[in-house]
Amino acid sequence: MPSESNILILGGNSRIGVSIEEIAFNSGFQVFRTKRSLGHGEKFDQKLICLDVSSQKSIEEFFLRIHDLKFGRIISLIGNTSIHIDKLNQEELRNYYLTYTLNLFQVIEKLSKNFLEAQSTSQFTAIASRSAHHGSFDADYAAVKGALVSYIRSLGRRLVPPKSAISISPGLIVGSEMFDQMSVLVQQDHWNRSEGKLLHVKEAAELIWSMSLLPYATSEPGGNYLLGPDYK
């Protein structure tokens, strides 16, 4: 199978990642995905690859595992809320920023330069968040997502066509892990502010898939695209 038919999903164990994997598989793509750790009955193999971006050792081993692969699409869903962090624990907070900025950007840079298909159109798609633009009660999450949007914008300007990069900023997605972590009151607040128009996991997955290899980057290299209802 030609390498442009390979897709890599970073953070592929999330619900939206699983939904994108299903769409890609049904579209005839060969799907590779990463997980931080194994679930019950799972084992890592050629297409299910360990990647824990908090660990330099894991990052190094990940690149060794994929050293002979090229991808037509790479979609990064890596990210996590910081609400579980005790704000007084500076070490945990420092590691949070280290993981989701420096370490993640290191992975994105190397994947884009060395593992995106260079002979035909290919694209790195990073999933950010509306909080990058409008802020959030989870200020640290909004900060790292804002940094991601800026990083992809710069990366997109440096990549040589036919390679490209974009970021997508969805609002809260119903049925996602983040949605389930929120209290009912916070969920309802999002429903109210979006006038009941929040996207569900399958809807968001289909839209992300459709945007993951379209000529967005030709008009705005490294561009950021909002996904779902426009609300603050």
Image: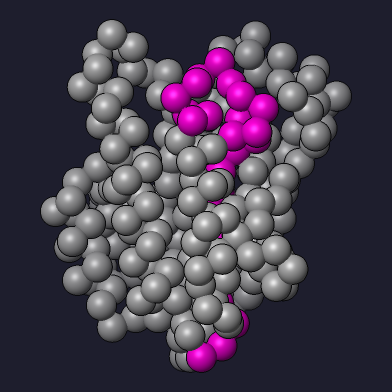
Question: In the rendered image, which quarter contains the C terminus?
Answer: top right
Magenta-colored stretch includes residue 220? no
* Residue occupying image coordinates x 45% and y 60%: 9
Question: Vertically, is 185 above or below 40?
Answer: above
> Residue 207, position in %: x, y?
71, 55
> Residue 8, position in %: x, y?
44, 67
User: Does residue 73 appear anywhere in the picture?
Assistant: no
> Residue 4, position in %: x, y?
52, 84
Who is closer to the viewer here, 93 or 194? 93
Residue lying furthest left in this view?
57
**Is residue 185 rendered to the left or right of residue 49?**
right
* Residue occupying image coordinates x 47% and y 82%: 117
Magenta-colored stretch includes residue 123? yes
**Is residue 216 rendered to the left or right of residue 39?**
right
- Residues in magenta? 119-143
User: Does residue 127 appear anywhere in the picture?
Assistant: yes
Residue lying furthest right in this view?
195
Who is closer to the viewer here, 14 or 113? 113
When asked about the image quadrant of residue 195, the answer is top right
Question: Vertically, is 56 above or below 25?
Answer: above
* Residue occupying image coordinates x 14% and y 53%: 57
Who is closer to the viewer here, 198 or 128? 128
When asked about the image quadrant of residue 222, the answer is bottom right
Question: Vertically, is 228 above or below 172?
Answer: below
Question: Vertically, is 120 above or below 28?
Answer: below
* Residue occupying image coordinates x 58% and y 82%: 162
When asked about the image quadrant of residue 49, the answer is bottom left
